[in-house]
Amino acid sequence: MRKEQNYFAGHSKRMNYKAIADRGWPIGSGPVESSCRQDQRRFKGPGQSWTRKGFAHLSALDQARRNNHWDELWLSA
Protein backbone atom coordinates (compact mmCIF):
# COMPACT_ATOMS: atom_id res chain seq x y z
CA MET A 1 0.00 0.00 0.00
CA ARG A 2 2.82 2.39 0.81
CA LYS A 3 4.35 1.85 -2.64
CA GLU A 4 1.09 2.92 -4.32
CA GLN A 5 0.71 5.91 -1.99
CA ASN A 6 4.22 7.06 -2.84
CA TYR A 7 3.55 6.60 -6.57
CA PHE A 8 0.38 8.70 -6.52
CA ALA A 9 1.96 11.36 -4.30
CA GLY A 10 4.94 11.65 -6.66
CA HIS A 11 2.81 11.80 -9.82
CA SER A 12 -0.16 13.84 -8.60
CA LYS A 13 0.68 16.82 -10.85
CA ARG A 14 0.38 14.59 -13.92
CA MET A 15 -2.97 13.16 -12.81
CA ASN A 16 -5.20 16.20 -12.92
CA TYR A 17 -7.88 14.39 -14.90
CA LYS A 18 -10.50 17.10 -14.55
CA ALA A 19 -8.26 19.73 -16.16
CA ILE A 20 -7.39 17.30 -18.95
CA ALA A 21 -11.05 16.43 -19.55
CA ASP A 22 -12.01 20.13 -19.51
CA ARG A 23 -9.56 20.67 -22.40
CA GLY A 24 -11.22 17.86 -24.34
CA TRP A 25 -8.11 15.70 -24.29
CA PRO A 26 -8.48 11.93 -24.01
CA ILE A 27 -7.90 10.32 -20.64
CA GLY A 28 -6.35 6.87 -20.58
CA SER A 29 -4.31 4.77 -22.93
CA GLY A 30 -7.16 3.64 -25.20
CA PRO A 31 -6.42 5.94 -28.17
CA VAL A 32 -2.71 5.07 -28.12
CA GLU A 33 -3.38 1.36 -27.83
CA SER A 34 -5.87 1.56 -30.68
CA SER A 35 -3.37 3.36 -32.90
CA CYS A 36 -0.71 0.74 -32.14
CA ARG A 37 -3.13 -2.05 -33.02
CA GLN A 38 -4.01 -0.35 -36.31
CA ASP A 39 -0.33 0.08 -37.19
CA GLN A 40 0.37 -3.56 -36.45
CA ARG A 41 -2.49 -4.71 -38.68
CA ARG A 42 -1.31 -2.37 -41.43
CA PHE A 43 2.38 -3.26 -41.35
CA LYS A 44 2.57 -6.81 -40.00
CA GLY A 45 0.73 -8.72 -42.68
CA PRO A 46 1.68 -12.22 -43.82
CA GLY A 47 5.02 -12.19 -45.58
CA GLN A 48 5.77 -8.58 -44.65
CA SER A 49 8.90 -7.56 -42.84
CA TRP A 50 10.46 -4.14 -42.51
CA THR A 51 13.74 -2.75 -41.37
CA ARG A 52 13.46 -0.29 -38.50
CA LYS A 53 14.27 2.59 -40.88
CA GLY A 54 11.80 1.34 -43.51
CA PHE A 55 9.03 1.04 -40.94
CA ALA A 56 9.72 4.57 -39.68
CA HIS A 57 9.34 5.92 -43.22
CA LEU A 58 6.15 3.96 -43.90
CA SER A 59 4.69 4.93 -40.56
CA ALA A 60 5.40 8.62 -41.21
CA LEU A 61 3.62 8.41 -44.56
CA ASP A 62 0.65 6.64 -43.03
CA GLN A 63 0.38 9.15 -40.17
CA ALA A 64 0.56 12.06 -42.62
CA ARG A 65 -2.24 10.52 -44.68
CA ARG A 66 -4.48 9.82 -41.68
CA ASN A 67 -3.94 13.29 -40.20
CA ASN A 68 -4.63 15.08 -43.49
CA HIS A 69 -1.05 16.34 -43.74
CA TRP A 70 -0.24 14.54 -46.97
CA ASP A 71 0.17 17.69 -49.07
CA GLU A 72 2.25 19.38 -46.36
CA LEU A 73 4.56 16.39 -46.31
CA TRP A 74 5.40 16.77 -49.97
CA LEU A 75 5.83 20.53 -49.74
CA SER A 76 8.56 20.09 -47.12
CA ALA A 77 10.49 17.51 -49.16
Image (cartoon, rainbow, N blue to C red):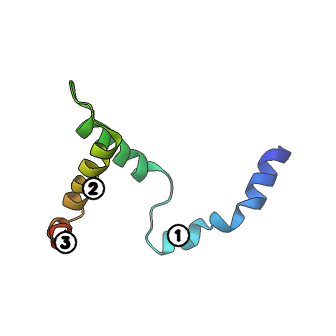
Q: Earlier in the sequence, mark 3 or mark 1?
A: 1
Q: Quadrant of the C terminus?
A: bottom left
Give the residue pinned by disc 3: 72
* CA gap, disc 2 and disc 3: 12 Å
**Front-most of residues 25 and 57:** 57
Amino acid type indicated by mark 1: Ile
Q: Earlier in the sequence, mark 2 or mark 3?
A: 2
Amino acid type indicated by mark 2: Ala
Give the residue pinned by disc 1: 20
Image point 77% across, 47% down: which residue? 4
**Front-most of residues 67 and 77:** 77
* CA gap, disc 1 and disc 2: 27 Å
Q: Earlier in the sequence, mark 1 or mark 2?
A: 1
Crowding at dot 1, Cα within 10 Å, few <14 / some 14-19 / many 20+, comes out as few
Q: Which mark is residue 60?
A: 2
Percent x, y of residue 31: 40, 52
Amino acid type indicated by mark 3: Glu
* CA gap, disc 3 and disc 1: 29 Å
